[in-house]
Amino acid sequence: MKAFELYHNMDRNNNIWRDRFDQPRLNHEDWLTPSPDLLSAINHAIDVEHEERKNGFIWWILSSIALILLVLSSSLFFHLHSSHAMENVRQSEIAISTELQPNEDVQITSTGFIPTRQNDDQNIAKNIRPIEQSYTASTLFQIEKEKDEYITQEQTATYNNQTSKGKKNKLSESRNILNRKLEEVNQEGQDDLMTLASRPMISASLIDKLSPNLISLRSAHSPLVQNIALLKPIASTNLAKHSIGMSLGLLSTAYSLSDHYSRDLDPADFSSGRGNLISLGIQYEFAVSSKLSITSAVDYNNIKSISGHNSSINYHVQNEENGVLETHTDLTMATPLGLIETDLLLQRSTANTGDIISSSANVHSEQTLHGIGISIGLLYDLLSFRNNTFFVSSDIRSNVILHHSNQLLDLHSNSDNYSIASGQVIKNQTNLNKQYLQSSIALGWNRRISNSTDLRMKYEYRQGLSKVYDQGDYSSLLSAQGFNIALVSKF
Amino acid sequence: MKANTLTIKSTDLKLISSILEGNREAFNELYRLYAKDFFLTCLRYAKNKADAEDYLQDAFVTLYKDLKQFDSDKASFRTWANRVVVNVCLQKVRKSSYKVIIEDIQNLVHTPSVNHNNALEQLSLKEMTKLISGLPSGYRTVFNMYVIDGFSHQEIAEYLNITASTSRTQLMKAKKILKKQMSTDESFRAVPQYG
């Protein structure tokens, strides 16, 4: 038969080709030997690639650190810049007080009051309550500002002393600076601006300096006080907008198996205990209002959990080699993250002579997941008093599994005739999702330990949103709950 | 045979487990076990032995990287790994600017051919490999993918960015060329040597 005639039967010929090339282990075909240098070239290529990947990871970490440092340094710059400006303000304040000479009377005479207020003639000094200097200085100039407006609109201002006009101009300049820096002034740590704004306050130090000269604001104080009371608190603009911190999390974890999975494992008395999660990370917050912040965090986490079941293991005596009373057996073990293949070394006692020794064994394994978690969420301050704040927070986490492994623990045979000497995992879990999502909700307490540093503690619950392991009807979700503590620096 | 297969599977799994733990010697052992199998695959797709070795190197590096994805429940290691090797070969073929062939049929006139008295079934693996290697690269790729590696014409079309009907045409032409090679008087045994 001519060769080309073979092609008349296409399928048959296809099968011939396919079968001929589908032979396993072609070790006898010497003509198929690749170059002897090829293996070392492959190993070299793997090393190079591994090095590049490692370098890539290092660059990623360094870039992240650089970004954080950039944000920190720029914030620090603005903060220092503001402090410098504030110092100028203080200098202006001193200059104002020193320029005012003794016995220079600054008087404002009102001629057009609203009648109902005319009899409400009090000395504004009665309302002066000495409080922190930084606060009152700005408020004084708020009073001045209100006074100017009042003068312009409703009053005729008379200055008995010509020089007071010049001083007024200086005051205006200083006032502008002060107004711009009002945020920093208030940020020094006063409580409730609304309460403070409702009562007139003047710098104690400034009053001390000016009191010999000042101030006869006759009949002018009533509308002034009223206007001050209407001042809006500047709380929303004087918050530390950014904060960054380090956090440590200690949580208890639990896997929840899909119905099919837990039902199928039930006959083997499968159990999956709680595990533990340790995380270390960096968090960043941006205050969008006095009570609400957007939060974001990156952390490295390590999760360990233990599972186990009861399994039937047969010792086959005929598999012993060289008269040694031991044999290997393969065992498929169930874990919350799928099945793993193990190789167990069984050793029997000399007393037994049967062909097969049947028994059950309790086998446990420990699953470890290493990963990076990235979260974004919201934090809301519920209640504040003194330096304490209670808050709730909620976020969405994306967890990336960097590495997972299994280790055999507690291999205990229930038979007196053989024991499990050792075991190793020969096939790890597969079909793990490299990325899984969780949502979390937390209740926490924030303690201010300095003007710029907070200690924050929260109890959080994380619920798995997407499956860690997913294979057909078998799947599992990972949830966790526990404490997270963080040291937060505001700027 | 079944016991042998099980032994192979068990050995493979142990080696793979060791490799995943970072044991490079286990990887070298895996290479020694499968280098010839996969080199044969590379030879089918490559133009020559040097290219085939280049393909094989990339294939083993890819296998090392992707070993974590291997699932012994779905396929044997050999089956899975061979598919990885085929994919690497196809990427290489595409990179070397795959052209849907209207390739140089003239060259075929000079292609050494098989003794027509030899039936396909009587050809050795080496002779069959040589026959495939004698095909123009486009025809060779389609023939390998369809006949030996079990791709459908639709899959071939998607891989090679051609239409399914073009794939069928290429396959038919490849077979005609093979027929021609085998029916000529000259012996195809003169085709490029592999060692």
Image: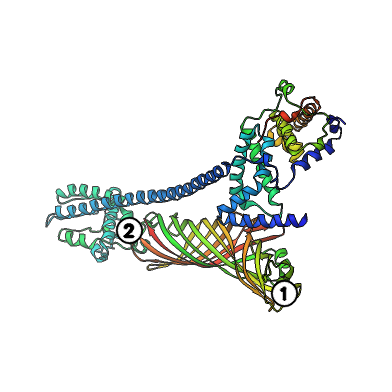
Q: Is residue B114 above or below residue A42?
A: above
Residue farthest along the front direction in this orientation: A322
Residue farthest along the right direction in this orientation: A1
Q: Residues within 10 Å of mark 1 (few under 14, many from 20)?
A: some
Q: How many marks?
A: 2
Disc 2 target residue: A186
Q: Secondary structure at mark 1?
A: strand
Nearest the eye: B40 or A97: B40
- In the image, taking residue A378 as reference, residue A267 lies left or right, namely right
Nearest the eye: B170 or B51: B51
Disc 1 target residue: A359
Determine the chain carrying the residue at label 1. Answer: A
Quarter of the rendering occupied by the C terminus of chain A: bottom left
Nearest the eye: B39 or A430: B39
Residue farthest along the top direction in this orientation: B106
- In the image, taking residue A355 as reference, residue A220 lies left or right, namely left
> Looking at the picture, how far across and down is residue B193, in whole percent?
67, 32
> Looking at the picture, how far across and down is residue A133, in whole percent?
25, 61
> Looking at the picture, how far across and down is residue A215, in whole percent?
20, 58
Nearest the eye: B86 or A196: B86
